[in-house]
Amino acid sequence: MKYAFFLGCTIPARSRNYELSARKVADKLGIELIDVEEFICCGFPMKASDYKSAEIMGAYNLCLAQEKDLDICVLCSSCASQLTEVAHSLSEDGPDREQINDELSRTGLKYGGGVKVRHFARILLEDIGIEKIKEHLIKDLSDLKTAIHYGCHYLKPSEIYDGFDDVENPKSLETLVALTGARVIDYPGKKRCCGGPVLPVEENVAMSVAKEKLDDIVDAGADAMCLVCPFCSVMYDDNQKSIESEFGTDYNLPVLYLTQLLGLAMGFDRKELGLNINVVKTKELLSKYFD
Amino acid sequence: MDKINLDRADSNFKKELASQPGGEKISACFTCRTCTASCPITAVNNNFNPLRIIRMALYGLKEEVLASDFIWLCSSCYACQERCPQGVTITEFMTLLKNLAVKEGNMPTGIRVQRDTIKGKGRIYPIDDFDNKKRAKVALPPIPTSCNVVEKLFPPVGTHL
């Protein structure tokens, strides 16, 4: 199984732990991730200010995958949403596609439709399957109480995701985390946004949104949080200390990527999964598994 | 919250919105407030209220809406859009309002910086040699430190063929 590997902007610059662990997990499961040097920003952060340009960037990336005759595997939920949306709106020949192709003609590329874009977690469920994943899990993480954060764009807007999972009652990440043996802890506000997109507009509002979820997760007694988007991780991991000092709270809640959790269960060590790069220290949590 | 003042209403604004992507369905809103009740931003800051923004737009308060700070507080999380019983694409509508505000010259500095960085460098966090050193240290492949294709995708105004 082979995919064009779309890293986006945040992951190579700020989330090497996510990239490292995803590559390890993919390798173990026989997923071939093809790096495409020419990929650029998916366009998502520009949707609010310049919708058309954002669509052009998305379409340009789709063309690069099309040139290689590959579908796209994405790690970032915002990239997944943006690229899926563009692929969705340009899936049929018509004036929209023509207009975009007119813009793309300056690069010598032309989008013909048909490139499928999926998040890594979705590929695990749909193309690999839980039975095959299970075969590679050698460590039981049953001491780990995990709170799952779905984030928004992994599943929304639902109209572009072909009925993958249920927005109001999602199960896909629970299904994957449960394979490791880890206990999934429910908590109020599980579907709440991380607040990230508001960060460049009004930091305090963004931090307040993130704080609510950290409060709920710690109250529910979770040992760690598990997520699938680098920008959500910026809010909960990178900014956790700032939230603590701004609101006078104390969480010390490790924030793990799904791929780090799966990697642990596959027997990879801390460094192989970039767990030493996580901002909130994971050492104490992991001492249970690496004594 | 202040009352909505209709003195400067622009009766064409509703039509203008309805003709653009994201604005097609707003007239279907029957003010049930599901959007506001679902909104994670309203929960922490009631300056942002999706129902109120939709009503203001429908009443034709173009200037108040497009010059406001509050439209930029939408996090585009889609909670409202997924739940709207009338099928109003509220998140897409907010995106439309933000895009129109930019055309009127109104945008937060942070959003402007993001746009200019992406259109100029092709990435929101451009990669430098130091980043690639850190990547090499953990055996991750290098990422290009420059991006020429953006000049082709977004040629300076006037040079467009």
Image (cartoon, rainbow, N blue to C red):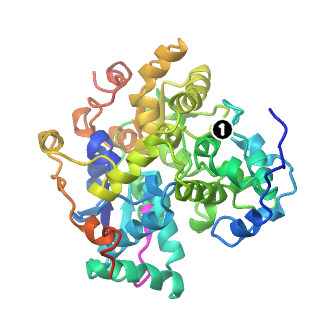
Residue in view at x 28 percent, y 25 percent: A290
Determine if residue B89 is in view. yes
The residue lying at 53 percent from left, 55 percent from top is: B102
Residue pictured at 40% horizontal, 82% vertical: A101
In which quadrant of the rendered view does residue A161 lie? bottom right
Quadrant, the N terminus of chain B: top right
Give the percent coordinates (x, y) of residue A238. 38, 29
Per the rendered image, the range of residues in magenta is A112-118
Which residue is disc 1 drawn over? Answer: B40
Q: Position of residue A150 (x, y in %)?
A: 55, 45
A17 lies left or right of A119: left
Q: Secondary structure at mark 1?
A: loop
- State which quadrant residue A192 falls in: top right
User: Mark 1, chain letter?
Assistant: B
Please tell me whether residue B1 is drawn above or below residue A249 in the rendered image. below
Front residue of A250/A38: it is A38
The question of residue A141 being in magenta is answered with no
Q: Residue A131 in the image: x percent, y percent?
A: 45, 57
Counting from the top left corner in percent of width and height, residue A241 is at 42, 20
The quadrant the C terminus of chain B occupies is: bottom left
Work out which residue is located at the far front of the displayed protein and give it: B7
- Could you say which quadrant of the image residue A256 lies in? top left
A111 over A244 or under it: above or below: below
Name the foreground residue: A90 vs A20. Answer: A90
Please state if B147 lies on the left or on the right of A86 as rendered.
Answer: left
Q: Main secondary structure of the magenta part?
A: loop
- Image side of residue B107 versus residue B11, left or right: left
- The 10 Å Cα crowd at callout 1, few under 14, some 14 to 19, many 20 or more, is many
Q: Is residue A91 above or below residue B23?
A: below
Q: Is residue A115 magenta?
A: yes
Q: Is residue A228 visible?
A: no
Q: Amino acid at mark 1?
A: Pro
